[in-house]
Amino acid sequence: MRPERLYLIDILQAAEAIERFLKGIGESDFMQDELRQSAVLQKLIVVGEAAARLPKGFTERHPEIPWPDIVAFRNIAVHEYFAVDWRIVWVTATQDVPLLREQMTRLLDEVDDGE
């Protein structure tokens, strides 16, 4: 099994990519940019996939992170792609992802210190 640290790095890198993709972009531009939408959604799927692969014991030790919501978002994005609400993607990418990036940075520090 892959170490938790690597999944956390996957999440962090995907969050950083989302922030790069959206730098200087407003909501209306995002709503009209299919390429950017696809890129952001793909990285959100990576976040959800990595979160889903973390051991249950690990996620239970970190209830401050909404693991079930992250995985549920991924499942909707993958299995109900045509039902994706781009406004929700925008809010997730611009409000939730920066917070998640900070949480992953702190969590990686804890894991590196021998959680």
Image (cartoon, helix red, strand yellow):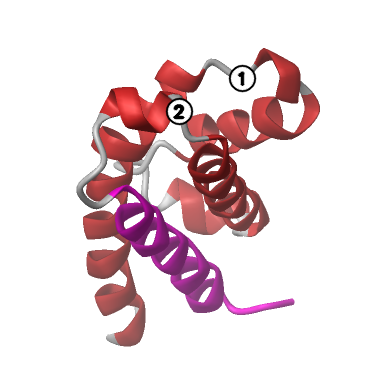
Is 39 located above or below residue 55 in the figure?
Answer: above
- Say whether residue 56 is visible: yes
Q: Is residue 100 left or right of residue 32?
A: left
Viewer-closest of 50 and 109: 50
Q: Position of residue 68 (x, y in %)?
A: 53, 33
Q: Residues within 10 Å of mark 2 (few under 14, many from 20)?
A: many
Part of the protein shown in magenta: 1-22
Q: Which residue is mark 1?
A: 84
Callout 1–callout 2 Cβ contact below 8 Å:
yes
Q: Inspect this view and state whether residue 114 appears.
A: no
Distance between the alpha carbons at the discs numbered 1 and 2:
8 Å
Q: Residue at horizontal 56%, vertical 41%?
A: 41
Residue type, label 1: Val
Q: Is residue 34 above or below residue 54?
A: above
Number of residue marks: 2
Displayed quadrant of residue 102: bottom left
Residue at image location 33% in from the left, 85% down from the top: 112
Side of 105 relative to 21 (left or right): left
**Residue denoted by label 2:** 89
In the rendered image, the quadrant that contains the N terminus is bottom right
Q: Disc 2 on helix, strand or loop?
A: helix
Q: What residue do we see at 48% from left, 77% from top? A: 5
Give me the disc on residue 16: none
The answer to if 6 sits in the magenta stretch is yes
Name the element at disc 1.
Answer: loop
| Residue 43 place in picture, x, y as percent | 54, 52
Q: Amino acid at mark 2?
A: Val
Query: Main structural element of the magenta stretch: helix, strand or loop?
Result: helix
Q: Nearer the viewer, residue 80 or 39?
A: 39
Location of residue 106 with respect to 68 vertically, above or below: below
